[in-house]
């Protein structure tokens, strides 16, 4: 039952979806190591790690700036909304990909530089 190709494909799809959905970017790091034997899952998890990691870094910088100057709080709220949109787009693309590799529109060119490095973390 667990060794059939259909079961492996459903796990691949599930792992890809959960890498985008589950506690970004921590969930994507978890599935980077869980799916390290499957190159598609590993790629998608690394892609999610890079994109959500960058979004988290921007969020933390804006949070610190908001603590210093309160009027920047609107940028923090705006970035939270943008990150939510990124999260939803990633979820939709992961659902449509069916466990295969997919490119995130717009920011994939920037993320593709770092994805191989992050994939190397899980050996």
Image (tube, grey):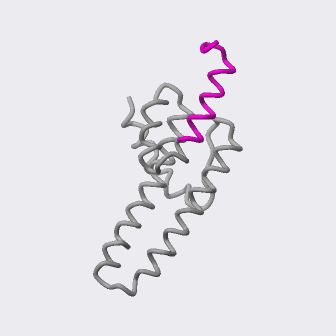
Which portion, as a residue range, is magenta? 1-18
Q: Against 48, is 64 above or below?
A: below
x 41%, y 67%: residue: 59
Q: Is residue 120 left or right of residue 46?
A: left
Q: Quadrant of the N terminus?
A: top right
Prevailing SS of the magenta stretch: helix
The residue depicted at 52 percent of the width and 42 percent of the height is 19
What residue is rendered at 56% in x and 55% in y? 108
The answer to whether 46 appears left or right of 62 in the picture is: right
Q: Residue placed at 37% from the left, 62% from the top? A: 57
- Indicate whether 74 appears above or below 24: below
- Residue 87 in which image quadrant: bottom right
Q: Is residue 5 magenta?
A: yes
Nearest to the observer: residue 11 or residue 119: 11
Instruction: Tell me: 22 left or right of 56.
Output: right
Q: Position of residue 27 (x, y in %)?
A: 46, 43
Residue at the bottom extreme of this rendering = 71
Quadrant containing the C terminus in the rendered view? top left
**Tag count in the figure?**
0
Percent across and percent down for residue 64 are 31, 73
Position in image of residue 69 (x %, y %): 32, 85
């Amino acid at each position: 039952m667990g060794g059939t190709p259909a079961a492996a494909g459903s796990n691949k799809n599930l792992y890809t979806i959960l890498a985008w959905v589950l506690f970004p970017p921590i969930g994507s790091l978890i599935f980077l190591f869980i799916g390290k034997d499957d190159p598609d899952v590993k790629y998608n998890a690394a892609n999610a790690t890079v994109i959500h990691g960058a979004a988290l870094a921007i969020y933390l910088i804006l949070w610190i700036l908001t603590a210093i100057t309160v009027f920047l709080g609107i940028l923090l709220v705006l970035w939270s909304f943008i990150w939510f949109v990124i999260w939803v787009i990633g979820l939709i693309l992961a659902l449509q990909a069916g466990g295969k590799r997919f490119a995130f529109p717009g920011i994939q060119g920037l993320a593709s530089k770092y994805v191989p490095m992050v994939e190397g973390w899980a050996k």
